[in-house]
């Protein structure tokens, strides 16, 4: 029947970046509009009232448009466009994983991990941007980490094969070089993710391989200017020490 939801059913195309924009999406000035659009989408799918199936309907239509973009990104092995990355992470954060489905999660998770890896290596690019742009970039990083935290807490099996990539990325995001107050919430989320990974039921071999590096890196953050970060570091380091 006709949808009662306030959204258009006219097909749209998610933009694929070309050339330099694919290699360095943080330096693509048009990313802001795409990230804000993804944020607006998350507001829509976060609404709890209405008929029981409307979120299922809108997510089904979104996935039909999103999956070809994700498949192309996986084929070319380039960093995901930030709008697409933000959309993927907002969907995982806002929707029940049972509604998304296991097969769809298997396609969404690699994009979220690729975004995590890219941000962990290029956060300097974000700090060099204007304040308003930098804020949006850090909000995107927060959504990525929030997505990771949710999956680690509720369905860690989707992340088992990525643990060896996730841990080094989280260590970079927790590194002593990040002291800006703007960055503190993201750093806390990264530390919470590290804490959860330590008890991942199916990745203990990978966890044990990284144990010494994790504890050494966390020791370097123990004198962070923020007491919030220091407390989070102590808690996370203690968990890794007792593995």
Image (cartoon, grey):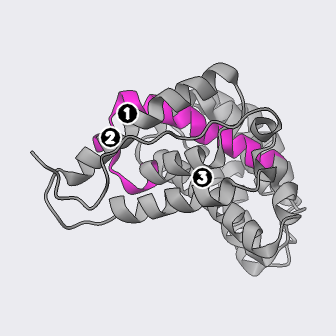
Say which residue label 2 marks.
61
Magenta span? 92-121
Of label 3 and label 2, which has the lower sequence position?
2
User: In terms of depth relative to the viewer, which is nearer, 19 or 209?
Assistant: 19
124 with respect to 87 (left or right): right
Give the overall secondary structure of the magenta segment.
helix
Lateral position of residue 117 relative to residue 176, left or right: left
**Disc 2, disc 1: CB below 8 Å?**
yes
Residue 104, compared with residue 177, is above or below; it is above
Q: In what quadrant of the picture does the N terminus appear?
A: top left
> Of label 1 and label 3, which has the lower sequence position?
1
Q: Residue at x 88, y 62 (%)?
A: 176
Tags 3 and 2 touching, CB below 8 Å:
no
Q: Position of residue 112 (x, y in %)?
A: 58, 42
How packed mark 3 is, by other alpha carbons closer than 10 Å (few <14, some 14-19, many 20 or more), is: many
Q: Nearer the viewer, mark 1 or mark 3?
A: 1
Instruction: Residue 242: give x, y in percent of width and height.
Output: 66, 49
Residue 188 magenta-highlighted: no
**46 relative to 85, above or below:** below
**In the image, which disc is placed on residue 144?**
3
Residue 63: quarter of image = top left
Residue for badge 1: 64
């Amino acid at each position: 029947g006709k949808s009662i939801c306030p959204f258009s059913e006219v097909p749209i195309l998610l933009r694929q970046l070309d050339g330099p924009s694919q290699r360095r999406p943080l330096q693509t000035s048009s990313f802001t509009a795409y990230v804000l659009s993804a944020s607006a989408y998350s507001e829509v799918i976060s609404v709890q009232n209405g008929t029981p199936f409307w979120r299922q309907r809108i997510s089904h239509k979104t996935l039909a448009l999103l999956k070809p973009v994700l498949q192309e990104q996986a084929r070319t092995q380039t960093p995901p466009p930030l709008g697409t990355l933000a959309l993927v992470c907002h969907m995982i954060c806002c929707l029940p994983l049972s509604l998304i489905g296991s097969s769809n999660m298997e396609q969404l998770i690699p994009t979220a991990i690729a975004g995590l890896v890219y941000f962990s290596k290029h956060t300097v690019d974000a700090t060099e941007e204007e304040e308003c742009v930098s804020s949006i970039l850090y909000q995107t990083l927060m959504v990525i980490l929030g997505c990771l935290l949710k999956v680690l807490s509720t369905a860690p099996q989707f992340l088992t094969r990525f643990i060896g990539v996730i841990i080094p990325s989280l260590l970079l995001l927790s590194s002593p070089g990040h002291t800006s107050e703007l960055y503190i919430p993201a750093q806390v989320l990264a530390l919470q993710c590290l804490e959860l990974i330590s008890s991942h039921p199916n990745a203990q071999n990978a966890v044990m391989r990284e144990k010494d590096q994790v504890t050494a890196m966390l020791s370097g953050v123990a004198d962070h200017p923020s007491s919030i970060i220091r407390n989070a570091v102590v808690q996370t380091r203690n968990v890794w020490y007792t593995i």
